[in-house]
Image: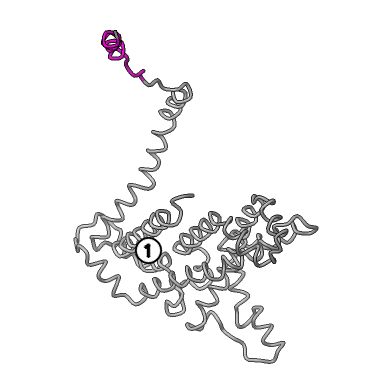
Amino acid sequence: MTDVSATTAMPNVARVRPAAKRKSPAAQGRMPVILLFLPPALLLFTIFVILPMGEAAWYSLYRWNGYGLPTEFVGTRNFEVLFKNGAFLTSLKNNALIILVSIAIQVPLAIWLATMLANRIRGVVLFRLIFFLPYVLAEVAAGLIWRFVYDGDYGLFAALAHFLGTATPYVLADKDLAMYAVLGVIVWKYFGFHMMLFIAGMQSLDKSVLEAAEIDGATGWQKFRYVTLPLLGSTLRLSVFFAVVGSLQLFDMIMPLTGGGPFNSTQTMVTFLYNFGVTRMQVGLGSAVGVVLFVICVTLAFGYKRIFMRND
């Protein structure tokens, strides 16, 4: 009797088919929106990003002054010349130095100020505004302002030296000091942005965790080291990412400040591209700089996201 029931049940089991997956109404509603907005976005991205990148890679293989069509094919000669150029090697070192200062000084300074300005106390909004204003200021305007401050004849440094009765320092004219002056301006200009990132992150923390640490007798440093900083991990990684990528693209603040001088001591990769590729009409060499900068940016961006931000 048991065998008969089992055999009669088998056809019923065999006839059972998994139900076909149906698209949810939300997915069906998104499809027209995707078909409407995706093609124009892809078209604009192709025109303004993909094609210029391809043209730069193509021009980098030619010796070309920008007039007519490139005909003198030189292969990788532009890249060989580039990495033998002392000014370009200096620009690479300067970009690395800017990244180092941004991570080692700018980000810790932003965290320190954010811990003091994250609480809603009287007058805190005014201090946030004061520290954030340099970031709002246009890069060109910031460069011109600090060029006047550093001026050894009529600037603030000259007035201060005259008041103290010391020799006037010509900071921007000294190839050993100019880059440090630029680094000071960079920290002043961008730390407010990172400060606001950390303030937003601290205000979103669970207050009960900090209160529990206080009840357990944790000091202010212990709360910051073992509670606040680990909870700000995603914000910290994002801030470092912005600092690294932004450091590789510095241009419009350095040009009015030093123009890459003196003696190419403050060149970055972008200012080198402009000074040697655009103003001197060496389009092939400038395109090679663009290719190198693109490879570095893409490698750092994807590598950083892959290693440090894969869970964010």
202 or 55, which lies in front? 202
Across and down, in percent, residue 113 comes to 66, 64
Across and down, in percent, residue 237 comes to 51, 58
User: What's the magenta bit mostly, secondary-structure-wise?
Assistant: helix
Q: Is residue 6 magenta?
A: yes
* SS state under label 1: helix
Residue 127 in the figure: left or right of residue 83:
right
Residue 72 in the figure: left or right of residue 125:
left
Quadrant the N terminus occupies? top left
Q: Is residue 247 above or below residue 6?
A: below
100 or 130, which lies in front? 100
Across and down, in percent, residue 19 comes to 36, 18
Q: Residue at x 42, y 58 (%)?
A: 304
Q: Is residue 37 above or below residue 22?
A: below
- Identify residue for label 1: 278
Residue 6 in the figure: left or right of residue 115:
left
Residue range highlighted in magenta:
2-20
**Number of marks in picture:** 1
- Under mark 1, the amino acid is Val
Across and down, in percent, residue 177 comes to 52, 82
Q: Is residue 234 magenta?
A: no
64 or 196, which lies in front? 196
Circle 1 packing at 10 Å, graded few (<14), some (14-19), many (20+), is: some
